[in-house]
Amino acid sequence: MTVKQTHREFDRIVKEYGKTAQLISEEERREIRQHEIKIKMKEIDRDIEVAREANRSKEIDRDIEVAREANRSKELDIELRKLQMGDEHRPPRGFHTVPGSQPCERGSSSCTVHYN
């Protein structure tokens, strides 16, 4: 029952029973007020929960963005290291090495790196 419905019910009782209802209604007024307070508390609790969910969503979005930035930073670090290594650490053009194997020429059908 909403607050407006509660007030309408109270007004209906007063109209129906007149002055007697006004004399009796002090206890009912307390009950109605308590009911109104409970309704407001539930509304506030719902608003708090909605705010918490929105905050969680923002935190997740921030975490995703931080992870993306960290990943991009790692990618840039790897690229920088490759550039700093220069040509002296690279195998001859057209060849590559696999740990524990001999260099092979690209295009060779016996190469497991190029023909998986």
Image (cartoon, helix red, strand yellow):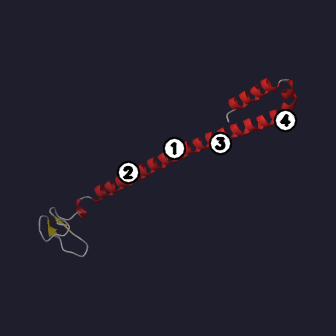
Q: Which residue is mark 1?
A: 58
Q: Residue 36 appears at what percent x and percent y?
A: 73, 35
The quarter holding residue 105 reads bottom left
Q: Please, what is the three-letter code of the amino acid marked with disc 3?
A: Asp
Residue at the spot x=81%, y=34% of the render? 28
Q: Quadrant of the C terminus?
A: bottom left
The residue that disc 4 covers is 27
- Counting residues from the N terminus, which is met first, the one under dot 4 or under dot 3? 4
Which element is circle 2 on? Answer: helix
According to the image, label 3 marks what residue? 45
Of badges 2 and 4, the one in the foreground is 4
Q: Foreground: 81 or 17?
A: 17
Q: Earlier in the sequence, mark 2 or mark 3?
A: 3
Q: Give the number of the mark in front: 4 or 3.
A: 4
Q: Is residue 27 above or below residue 66?
A: above
Cα separation between marks 2 and 4: 68 Å
How far apart marks 1 and 3 lie (CA) works out to 20 Å
Horizontal relation, residue 65 to residue 16: left or right: left
Residue under pointer 2: 72
User: Which is more N-terminal, label 4 or label 2?
Assistant: 4
Q: Earlier in the sequence, mark 4 or mark 1?
A: 4
Q: Tell me whether the residue at label 4 lies in contact with that at label 3, contact meaning CB atoms closer than 8 angstroms.
A: no
On-image quarter of the N terminus: top right
Q: Are marks 4 and 1 in contact (CB under 8 Å)?
A: no
Q: In what element is the residue under mark 3?
A: helix
Badge 3: how crowded within 10 Å, few (<14), some, or many (20+)? few
